[in-house]
Every structure is written in structure tokens, then in C-alpha cells.
């Protein structure tokens, strides 16, 4: 979840009489942005090892993945991601490489596993790897359940939040995740795979 803005509402919300929904001030002061790299466990419904930073580089994604895998280093892991370039990076491909003699590691932009985003995605998606990445089809990131969770945090916290700093925003996000995880449960996935008819 990139570009989460720390916005301070310029004026307080207006409430004319009890029971009325407060009218939110539309003018704001920007205090910067944060990026949240989250890992939603579909089996438990919990958000695990959230990673907050001011950037969303391939190094940030690699650090976040390493931190999560470090919680159970011998377990098999399957990450479901969208097609963002940081999810198919050279740095990510280098983390858990097994020898692949018929392809070789290669050189970014030229040969082997590192040749292109497609070749790196093929390598990272390999079912024989203990840590593998599965990518949602193009324009189908809605199939990834973390997108549902991002909608929840947006509606319940970020939409009306007024923050004086990035630090306050990040503390609020971490507090929300901690509270959410106390009652977390798996989402009931209702999509049955039936093709949409237009």
C-alpha cells in the first residue's frame, strides 16, 4: 500500500447537532507519505510483519520478505503478489537461488534468470522452490485478499485520520494492525471462478 499520506485537516470537523454525521474539512496540510508492505495470512486473517517505510523499492520488499521468512526459516512459503516490478526484482531473485544449470543466473537485461522481469517471475514462481511467488494475472490484483484488507484499513482508519507527522501515521497504522489481529479471521472467499459474462 504505497503513498499513504499523513494529512492534517486544516480545520476541525463540523457537527451542527447531535446525531448528525460530522462534516469533514476538505483542506489539509501534507506531512509526507509512507508505504506499507503487508503480508496477509489467508489461513488466519492476520496481517503479519508489517513493514513501514518512506519508500517502496525492491530493497524494501526484499527486507520485508526476509523479515517474514525469518520468523520460520525452514517452512515453505508461498507469496501471492501483483505484477509490480519490485515483486519480480533482481534482488529478490538472488535471495533463494538454487543452482539451475540449464539456465544459469545470467546478467540483468541480457541472459539467464535475470534477463527480464518475465524470466525472473518464472524463476520465482517455480513450484520446486521452498519459497515461491505466485502472481495475479494482469488487471486482476483484486483476486489477492490483501487488497480487501487494504480497503478495510482505508475505510476504518485512514479515510478520516488527521496526522501531524509521518511518525504519528505509522504508529496509528501499527496500532490498528495490532488491534485488528486480536479478532482476525479468514475472509470468506465467495468468488467461485465463474467467468463473467458481458
Image: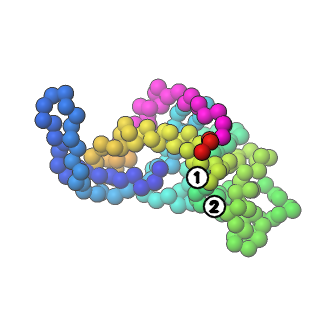
> Would you say 128 lies left or right of 160 here?
right
User: Is 93 left or right of 190, judged from the image as shown?
Assistant: right
Please identify the quarter of the rendering in which residue 17 is found: top left
Measured as percent of width and height from the top left, residue 146 is found at 53, 41
Asked if residue 36 shows in the view, the reply is yes
For residue 157, above or below residue 188: below
> Does 149 lie within the magenta span?
no
Q: Is residue 51 left or right of residue 91?
A: left
Indicate the position of residue 97 as horizontal and vertical percent values: 74, 56
Q: Secondary structure at mark 2?
A: loop
Closer to us: mark 2 or mark 1? 1
Instruction: Tell me the residue at 45%/41% (across/down).
Output: 151
Mark 2 or mark 1: name the one nearer the start of the chain.
2
Q: Which mark is residue 139?
A: 1
Q: Position of residue 161 (x, y in %)?
A: 30, 44
Q: Which segment did they paint magenta?
A: 172-195
At 64% across and 58% down in the image, what residue appears? 88
Q: Nearer the viewer, residue 26 or 115?
A: 26
Amino acid at each position: 500500500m504505497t503513498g499513504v499520506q499523513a494529512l492534517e485537516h486544516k480545520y476541525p470537523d463540523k457537527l451542527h447537532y447531535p446525531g448528525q454525521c460530522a462534516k469533514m474539512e476538505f483542506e489539509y496540510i501534507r506531512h509526507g507519505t509512507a508505504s506499507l508492505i503487508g503480508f496477509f495470512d489467508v489461513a488466519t486473517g492476520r496481517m503479519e510483519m508489517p513493514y513501514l517505510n518512506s519508500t517502496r523499492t525492491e530493497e524494501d520488499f526484499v527486507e520485508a520478505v526476509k523479515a517474514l521468512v525469518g520468523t520460520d526459516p525452514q517452512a515453505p512459503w508461498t507469496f501471492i503478489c501483483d505484477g509490480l516490478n519490485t515483486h519480480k526484482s533482481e534482488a529478490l531473485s538472488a535471495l533463494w537461488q538454487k543452482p539451475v544449470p540449464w539456465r544459469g543466473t545470467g546478467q540483468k537485461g541480457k541472459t539467464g534468470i535475470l534477463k527480464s522481469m518475465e524470466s525472473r517471475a518464472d524463476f520465482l514462481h517455480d513450484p520446486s522452490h521452498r519459497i515461491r511467488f505466485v502472481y495475479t494475472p494482469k488487471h486482476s490484483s483484486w483476486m489477492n485478499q490483501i487488497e480487501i484488507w487494504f480497503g478495510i484499513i482505508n475505510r476504518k482508519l485512514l479515510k478520516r485520520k488527521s496526522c501531524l507527522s509521518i511518525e504519528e501515521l505509522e504508529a496509528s497504522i501499527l496500532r490498528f494492525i495490532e488491534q485488528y489481529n486480536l479478532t482476525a479471521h479468514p475472509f470468506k472467499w465467495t468468488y467461485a471462478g465463474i467467468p463473467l459474462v458481458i
